[in-house]
Image (cartoon, helix red, strand yellow):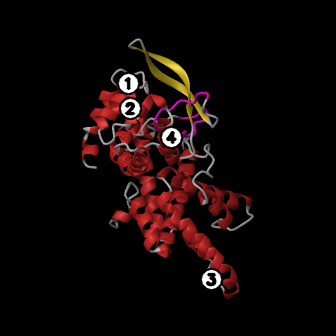
């Protein structure tokens, strides 16, 4: 068995950060890597379809949740390895179509195409992991649809569809990503992916970004329990901000736990829904900045403990231990490393 390198490990959570850096230093190499990631997702979708077709005829002996979990891990690694070692030709087709450098007759169009590709790659440093996964899934779905309708070669994906999906961070419809797809596997992954967004939000309102990220970890259970809409799609709401009369956007209505006179009760409530995690951080900062109730919290500056205390005093949550829980998260090993 060939040895798997760091760049081929399917659970390498730092690969996205490396790709963002590479997109700025070497766009051509970054384009090849992005194409391989597209192909890896496409191959993995084929594996999932094959597994699903066999579920009804499979033996109960091998149908445990643990077996399915390890099968998914194996399929993910196989998909990554196949894409990095030739694959099915999808990556090569993507590179040809996005770069458009083959053929003398395409000279006039190559300048605009190159500019478009460069703009697309430069946006990688502003796209969060949830949106990048959406872009990959969208391209794989388009490739599968093209193959089934036989209107184009199996590996043909239009430049227009890709540019539309990545032209703006808010252009992705909020109902395109399942809540299960944005679940973080570990606190390390949660902190690594969202720390840059927390720093941006902290700078905009003058608050310690660690306190902001700790609150997001508390509200979302380290990203393991995302708020899902009725159709099962992600709301990207990391801070549990409810959709009151001031909110005119999309909503997610779910069961929630509220404390009334110190007693926890289950209630039905509507929460704000966003198109990305970045939108969630932006709205959170605006929510605090425009509310008189949190004026004292914003005066806390770098004092994360004071910030959490004033959030609770301002009525951000009904949990009487809300501030203490945020401080406990701030003391955890994942935050002391920041």
Mark 2 lies on residue: 296
Q: Which of marks 2 and 4 is nearer the N terminus?
A: 4
Quick one: SS at disc 4?
helix
Left or right for 166, reference 61 = right
Look at the picture and state if 244 lies above or below 27. above
Label 1 vs 4, first from the N-terminus: 4
The answer to which of 230 and 278 lies nearer the viewer is: 278
Between disc 2 and disc 1, whose residue precedes? 2
Report which residue position mark 3 lands on. Answer: 102
The residue that disc 4 covers is 286
Can you name the residue that lies furthest to the bottom here? 104
Q: Is the magenta stretch mostly helix, strand or loop?
A: loop
* Magenta segment: 228-245
Q: In which quarter of the image is residue 175?
A: top right
Identify the residue shown where x is 24% and y is 43%: 333
**Mark 1 highlights which residue?**
313
Where disc 1 sits, the SS reads: helix
Residue 228: mark = none
Q: What element carries label 2?
A: helix
Gap in angstroms between the C-alphas marked 4 and 3? 48 Å
Tags 2 and 1 in contact by the CB under 8 Å rule? yes
Q: Tell me how far mark 2 sits from mark 4, CA to CA.
A: 15 Å
């Amino acid at each position: 068995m060939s040895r798997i390198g760091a760049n081929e490990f399917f659970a390498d959570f730092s690969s996205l950060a490396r790709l963002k850096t590479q997109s700025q230093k070497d766009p051509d190499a970054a384009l090849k890597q992005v194409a391989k990631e597209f192909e890896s997702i496409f191959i993995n979708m084929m594996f999932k379809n094959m597994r699903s077709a066999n579920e009804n005829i499979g033996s109960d002996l091998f149908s445990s949740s643990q077996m399915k979990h390890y099968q998914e891990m194996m399929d993910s690694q196989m998909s990554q390895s196949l894409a990095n070692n030739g694959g099915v030709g999808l990556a090569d087709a993507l590179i040809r179509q996005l770069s458009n450098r083959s053929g003398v007759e395409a000279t006039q169009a190559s300048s605009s195409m190159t500019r478009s590709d460069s703009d697309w790659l430069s946006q990688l440093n502003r796209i969060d992991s949830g949106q990048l996964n959406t872009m990959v899934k969208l391209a794989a779905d388009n490739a599968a649809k093209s193959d089934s309708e036989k209107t184009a070669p199996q590996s043909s994906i239009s430049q227009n569809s890709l540019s539309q999906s990545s032209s703006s961070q808010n252009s992705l419809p909020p109902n395109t990503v399942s809540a299960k797809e944005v679940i973080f596997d570990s606190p390390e992954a949660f902190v690594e992916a969202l720390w840059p967004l927390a720093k941006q939000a902290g700078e905009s309102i003058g608050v310690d970004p660690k306190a902001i990220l700790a609150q997001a970890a508390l509200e979302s259970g380290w990203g393991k329990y995302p708020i899902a809409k009725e159709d099962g799609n992600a709301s990207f709401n990391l801070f549990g901000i409810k959709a009151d009369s001031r909110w005119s956007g999309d909503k997610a209505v779910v069961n929630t736990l509220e404390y009334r006179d110190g007693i926890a009760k289950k209630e039905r409530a509507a929460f704000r829904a966003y198109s990305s995690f970045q939108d969630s951080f932006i709205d959170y900062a605006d929510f605090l900045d425009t509310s008189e109730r949190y004026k004292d919290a914003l005066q806390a500056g770098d004092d994360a403990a004071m910030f959490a205390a004033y959030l609770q005093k301002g009525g951000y949550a009904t949990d009487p231990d809300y501030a203490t829980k945020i401080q406990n998260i701030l003391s955890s090993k994942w935050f002391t490393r920041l």
